[in-house]
Amino acid sequence: MVVAARNKQHPLQLGKSGKRDLRTQFGVLPYRVVNGKVQILLITSRETGRWIIPKGWPEAGLSATASAAREAWEEAGIEGRISETCLGLYSYLKALEDRDRLPVVVAVFPVKVSRLAEKFPEQKARKRKWFSRKKAAARVTEPELRRILRDFDPSLVHL
């Protein structure tokens, strides 16, 4: 079982300047199986509109999967069962307001979607769409996330 710290996450230093702290986020790979075919739900980012998975910062008092599940609900209206098994990690540079970029590593957990809510907190800020594994992988920017999406096998997920 992967468990997040119950207190505020502290960044790891990547040098002496302190300007490029490494942070961790938790995300979900939302999936369903329709007629034997795996489909993956992607959402758009609020700022650029590019295709991403739901993800967010660790929340005090919540495990990694509970934090990821909360982000899945807030960003995409996802209801379902999340696995405690991390599918993998990917990294990206998060753009900040001061035009600096913060390196982030995202731990990805699969969630079998049972329902998508019509109303959810960020419904006006994002689009959501189901894709095949191959098409989902082609839509995201991060190479490690592409691999996680392309190689995802729901038969290996323990719920």
Image (tube, rainbow, N blue to C red):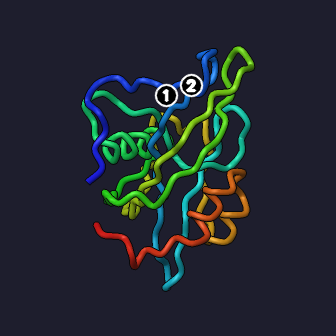
Q: Residues within 10 Å of mark 2 (few under 14, many from 20)?
A: some
> Residue drawn 54% across and 39% down?
123
Nearest to the observer: residue 46 or residue 119: 46
Q: Earlier in the sequence, mark 1 or mark 2?
A: 1
Return the mark for residue 81.
none
Image coordinates of residue 106 in percent, x first then y, are 51, 45
Vertical position of residue 48 compared to residue 108: above or below? above
In the figure, residue 146 lies in which quadrant? bottom right
The quadrant of the image that shows the N terminus is bottom left
User: Which quarter of the rendered picture does the C terminus lie within?
Assistant: bottom left
Image location (x, y in percent) of residue 111: 40, 59
Residue lying farthest to the bottom in this orientation: 36
- Residue for badge 2: 21
Judging depth in this view, the residue of 85 and 30 nearest the camera is: 85
Query: Which residue is found at the position 42% from the left and 51% from the top?
Result: 78
Q: Is residue 104 above or below residue 8?
A: below
Q: Residues within 10 Å of mark 1 (few under 14, many from 20)?
A: few
Q: Residue 12: which numbered mark, if any?
A: 1
Relative placement, left or right, of 94 versus 116 is: right
Residue drawn 66% across the image and 22% down it: 96
